[in-house]
Image (spheres, helix red, strand yellow):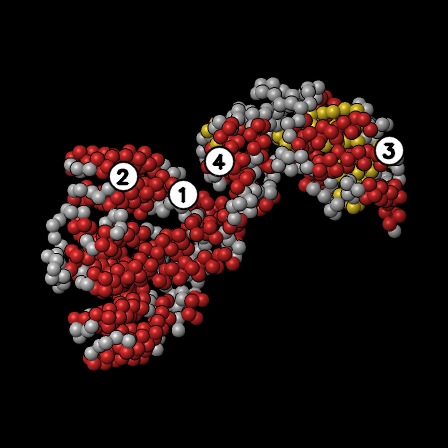
Amino acid sequence: MDHQKNMTNLKKPLVIITGASGNIGGSLCDALRKDYFVVGLDINPCDKADISIDCNLTSENSVKSAFNEIRSQYGQKIAAAIHLIAYFDFTGQPNPLYQSVTIEGTQRLLNILQDFEVDRFIFSSTMLVHEPTVPGQKINEGMPLKPRWAYPQSKVEAEKVIKQQHNKIPYTILRLAGVYDNDRAVPTLSHQIARIYERDFRSHLYSGDLMAGQALLHKEDMVDLFKRVVDRRKKLPHTNIMLAGEDEVMSYQELQNRIGYLIFGKKEWQTVDIPEFIAKSGAWLEEQAEPIVPDTIDQGKKPFIKPFMIDLASDHYDIDISRAQKLLHWKPKHRIYEGLKNLIASLKKDPAAWYKRNGVLLPDWVRTAQEKDLNADQIRHKHETEYFRQHNENLWAHFLNLGLAFWLMTAPFILAYESQAMVWSDVISGVVLLILSFMSLSWRFGLARWLCGAVGLWLLGAPLIFWAPTAAAYLNDTIVGMLVMGFAILTRPVPGVAAVAAQTGPTIPPGWSYSPSSWFQRLPIIILAFIGFFISRYLCAYQLGHIDSVWEPFFAGSPQDPRNGTEEIITSSISQAWPVPDAGLGAMTYALEILTGIIGSARRWRTMPWLVILFGIMIVPLGIVSIFFIIIQPILIGTWCTLCLIAAVAMLIQIPYSIDELVATGQFLSRRKKQGRSLIHVFFQGDTDEGRREVIEDNFAQRPSKIFKEILGGGVTLPWNLVMCLPIGIWLMFTRITLDAGTSMANADHLIGSLVLTVAITALAESGRASRFFLIPLGLALLVTPFFYDTSIESLISSIFCGLLLIIFSLPRGSVHNRYGTWDRFIV
């Protein structure tokens, strides 16, 4: 049966194609099978050939075995041997495979073909073997060969082998332009498209002649070229070389403009010509840094642009195809100008598939969209449209920052700062803000908005660093700094959020019954932060010498010191150990809490994880620091500060309202990491999550009582047992007054009482309810401390009684009204 099939196939001329399993080889098989019997030689199966034979050109035995099989099955006569196999990489460095595959592989193939009757040997070479020219000058087959890097150098050596060892076999060498089709392009073009599609800043940079370009060739025209050579194999000159490509070349700038227009509708893609030494240094640094940079940051992506490519950036390849036209009556039917339409359409239709076909690493947002079974381009387009609309609606904010910039430059001379450092700080800040605010008017410069925020942050800190001698300077920089940050960052759209994070994914975390990032959850924190801010600014004014005294209703301080308790504490050696006023540092922290509390939507637990973590750091650890300072006040300084206590309570109450958002963000980051996402990218740009997208807005149009109920009905509840712990903690803090306890015992009570308040208030959060068990060791400590110190019977009874109550009150969990996904198992 096989013998009869082979005899039937012999009615067609035999064509052998090396590399038939590849994209180009498969297309040639499809085109030739109608008129020829095609044998595919490759190390992988050639599905589109009539028959596939395993053949490794680097092995003499493999080549002999393959051709012995051809001889035994199909005889000696071969109409054409098309040689496509060659080694290729874009490192620019010599590789042993160029020698073993491209050069020696060609030699082995030619040697074995000497034993056959071959009508024509057809070799696929490249136009890059020629010396490049300049725009306006075409390259023909007679012009000098001067390959500029390893790949075309290997092709030149292979051509020499053919010329020297072809003997009786006629040959045609086709020096082809870069091949593309409707879905794929040569690596340089596909990466150029990807850079523009991703709005990579490198898409706007080029080091070379922007008017230079390289000829391209559509795959259909290339297949037609090969078929014409095979069909005319006996009519062509015994040996000949032909250049093949489109006779019109688009320059790099023209390609940039065309790609930008087809993707974004922009007629001109701004491209800056940068000096060669800068581009080379940047490419070298990127290449050297790649092994050092963790894969969680760059996803293992190796830089495409290598230093050697900078040397080739001005190479111009515009080829003369008149010989192919004369001998083959061949002329390309396609043009890259129109071909880009199909390439970009293919990209937009299925970005993930396009990236994979072209061997370009998928951007994180494209991979995520694929995971959600959504079209990444539609997400990108929707996000950019919405982003652009919101940006235009809020341009007023950046114009106001322009006005504040001029205000900063003039205010020092109006308000009489009395500090040269403060004058220069405001003037320079005003100039920088003027530039950055102007840049922020463009929706593309999201980074400029963050830099404006950095200017605002500096303004908050400058009066502290330079110890502003006047209240006007401190007040001006504080107010302007907060306004600058508010106008730059708090207005929509929020810069830096990934398109897939903004346009997909749920508002409520998977398994949760509410969003921990809702306004009803953040509002208590913001209100409490304002209380702390005003108190801290007031105390800072005293530290800076702007006011002569501070209000203190309860604590007179040391009898030997005319200052009251508050004044003693904020001018103590502990406060003065800081290089800046510590109350001012607290005010700055509260200001940042207010601003970071306002920014973002109800989905920010997954769209802005970095901000949630920053928000939590300012509340939880700094809240604990505040408690520490409250603890040491009577112990080390010997008095209290009423306003400090109020500010500390405000900071402490913020903790239970912030825990749930931290938990949700932690769960989200853990899920994305397990699903293979880059943790760094997700942390800073956000991502989607399990569940469909829903928009849930907080309803502030309802009655105030309903809003108040919503605030209390979130993740914070008031279990009776934890509420009962609060007066116990307060009682313990003041036993030196109520029970006239001895110094050591009073200090121990004060320390434990402060910690009781911290634990009990933290445990009011349902998500932090398990923290109440820390009350048990505190209760045990109260049971034993009276026996370590000389104390009164009243203090002994108080300590033991409070200790027992704390242990008892720590046992009930209290009511939990909400669900927290996988965190539920920790709410015990």
Crowd band around label 3 with a 10 angstrom C-alpha radius: few (<14), some (14–19), many (20+): some
Q: Earlier in the sequence, mark 1 or mark 4?
A: 4
Q: CA distance from mark 2 to mark 1?
A: 24 Å
Q: Residues within 10 Å of mark 4 (few under 14, many from 20)?
A: few
Tell me the number on the disc at residue 114.
Answer: 3
Q: Is residue 36 visible?
A: no
- Three-letter code for the amino acid on which mark 1 is drawn: Thr
Q: Earlier in the sequence, mark 2 or mark 1?
A: 1
Vertical side of 268 occupied by 761: above or below: below
The residue beneath circle 4 is 202
Image quarter in which the C terminus is found: bottom left
Q: Please give the residue where the numbered disc 2 appears in the rendered image.
A: 401
Going by the numbered disc 2, the residue's amino acid type is: Asn
Task: Give yes or no for contact between labels 2 and 1 (Cβ–Cβ under 8 Å).
Answer: no
Q: Amino acid at mark 3?
A: Gln
| SS state under label 2 | helix
Give the quarter of the image for residue 62: top right
Please state if 790 lies on the left or on the right of 504 as rendered.
left
Residue at the spot 78% in from the left edge and 46% down from the top edge? 54
Circle 3 or circle 4, nearest the eye: 4
Identify which amino acid the numbered label 4 is placed on: Arg
First of labels 3, 2 by sequence position: 3
State which quadrant residue 146 falls in: top right
Q: Secondary structure at mark 1?
A: helix
Q: CA distance from mark 3 to mark 1?
A: 64 Å
Residue at figure coordinates x 43%, y 52% from the top left: 683
Q: Residue 8, how many percent across, how many down?
A: 86, 44
Residue at image mark 1: 385
